[in-house]
């Protein structure tokens, strides 16, 4: 009797508020997300597994690309709403320095920071030092975007001039890793955890990119026009992504996080997953805890692009390529 009375009262209040008490909950908005395949996608995998996206009103369809050209053009063509990729890609195309032909002044911007790049120079077994690279081939994603300029800078700082090696285009990290294993190139910059699986297969790590200082690696990016009309969905994505990061850093979830790495990455073993976890989610740095953009890291990206990019431009203002308003609305000002 009391239960029926309470149910009736709840229905009456719902009617008075203009709400259909019998109406099903609104379905989450589907967001199409494009990224390169790799362990840096752990926050997305975790958020999908734990239902964090749906809890924030969205669902995510994650697709992988092998090239930055496809990622950028597909984002601009509206095939995807959000891209997760290196900051340099978005700066390059915003400045007209990318490989693909796109309309002038695209409205790309970054809204979250994922990591510092996790980059290292990896070489085939016969190349044991930078000096051994002279006369050899070095692969990059694209010749003018992604890690192309970081690769050139790391080699230059270790005594390898532009003319000492031949740079070749080989696509994203997963593809460069496969081609290194096949002996198609002699060295490349790989991202964690691919350097771990490469070492396990007998390849050599020559250097890590930490020597460059702060560097903004993965970012979440979108079109400004889309974000302006989908603020709720973008904020929902950001909150779910951060919830995924928080869940990953909870050491009680370590075993499941390692299982996600093994399930999603080629050549990943439980032993390598333990090493990868320590790098991707270490106390000393890894996936960005608060998912905020690192402005000093963005400045490093701009410095390298100013040095190597064509047509020649001096780039100094990180705020040209980011918008912090969505972060502030999602989490408050830092």
Image: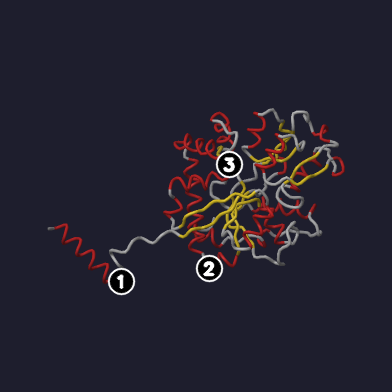
Judging depth in this view, the residue of 56 and 289 nearest the camera is: 56
Identify residue for label 1: 18
Residue at 30% over, 71% down:
18
Residue 206 image position (x, y, % from top left): 74, 33
Is residue 2 found left or right of 225 in the rendered image?
left
Q: Is residue 115 left or right of residue 101?
A: left
Q: Please tell me in which quadrant of the rendered image residue 224 appears.
A: bottom right
Quick check: marks 2 and 1 in contact, CB under 8 Å?
Answer: no
SS at mark 2? helix
Q: Tag 3 or tag 2, which sits nearer the N-term? A: 3
Pick whichever of labels 3 and 1 is earlier in the sequence.
Answer: 1
Q: Is residue 172 left or right of 97 when viewed as pictured?
A: left
Which residue is situated farthest in the right direction here?
163
> Could you tell me which residue is drawn at 17 percent across and 57 percent down?
3
Rendered view: 65 above or below 159: below
315 horizontally vs 84: left or right: right
Q: In front here: 100 or 91?
A: 100
Residue named by callout 2: 229
Q: Residue at x 57, y 51 (%)?
A: 63
Mark number displayed over residue 39: 3
Distance of mark 2 from mark 3, alpha carbons?
Answer: 31 Å
Quadrant in which residue 223 is drawn? bottom right
């Amino acid at each position: 009797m009391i239960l029926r009375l309470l149910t009736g009262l709840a229905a009456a209040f719902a009617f008075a508020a203009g709400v259909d008490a019998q109406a099903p909950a609104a379905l989450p908005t589907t967001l199409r997300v494009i990224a390169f395949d790799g362990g840096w996608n752990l926050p997305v995998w975790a958020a999908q597994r734990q239902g964090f996206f749906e809890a924030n009103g969205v669902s995510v369809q994650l697709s992988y690309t092998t090239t930055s050209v496809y990622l950028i053009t597909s984002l601009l063509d509206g095939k995807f709403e959000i891209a997760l990729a290196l900051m340099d890609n978005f700066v390059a195309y915003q400045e007209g320095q990318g490989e693909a032909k796109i309309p002038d002044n695209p409205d790309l911007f970054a809204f979250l920071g994922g990591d510092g790049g996790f980059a290292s120079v990896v070489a085939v077994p016969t190349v044991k030092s930078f000096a051994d690279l002279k006369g050899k081939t070095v692969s990059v994603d694209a010749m003018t975007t992604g890690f192309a300029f970081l690769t050139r800078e790391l080699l230059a700082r270790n005594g390898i001039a532009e003319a000492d090696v031949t740079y070749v285009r080989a696509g994203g990290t997963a593809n460069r890793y496969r081609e290194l294993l096949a002996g198609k190139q002699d060295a490349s910059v790989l991202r964690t955890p691919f350097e771990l699986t490469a070492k396990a297969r007998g390849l050599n790590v020559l250097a890590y990119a930490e020597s460059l200082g702060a560097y903004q690696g993965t970012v979440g990016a979108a079109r400004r026009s889309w974000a302006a009309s989908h603020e709720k969905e973008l904020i929902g994505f950001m909150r779910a992504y951060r919830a995924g990061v928080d869940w990953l850093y909870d050491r009680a979830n370590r075993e499941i996080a390692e299982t996600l790495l093994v399930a999603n990455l080629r050549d990943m073993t439980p032993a390598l997953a333990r090493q990868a976890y320590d790098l991707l989610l270490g106390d000393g740095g890894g996936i960005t805890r608060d998912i905020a953009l690192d402005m000093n890291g963005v400045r490093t990206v701009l410095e390298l692009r100013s040095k190597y990019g064509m047509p020649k431009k001096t780039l100094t203002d990180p705020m040209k390529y980011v918008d912090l308003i969505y972060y502030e609305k999602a989490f408050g000002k830092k």
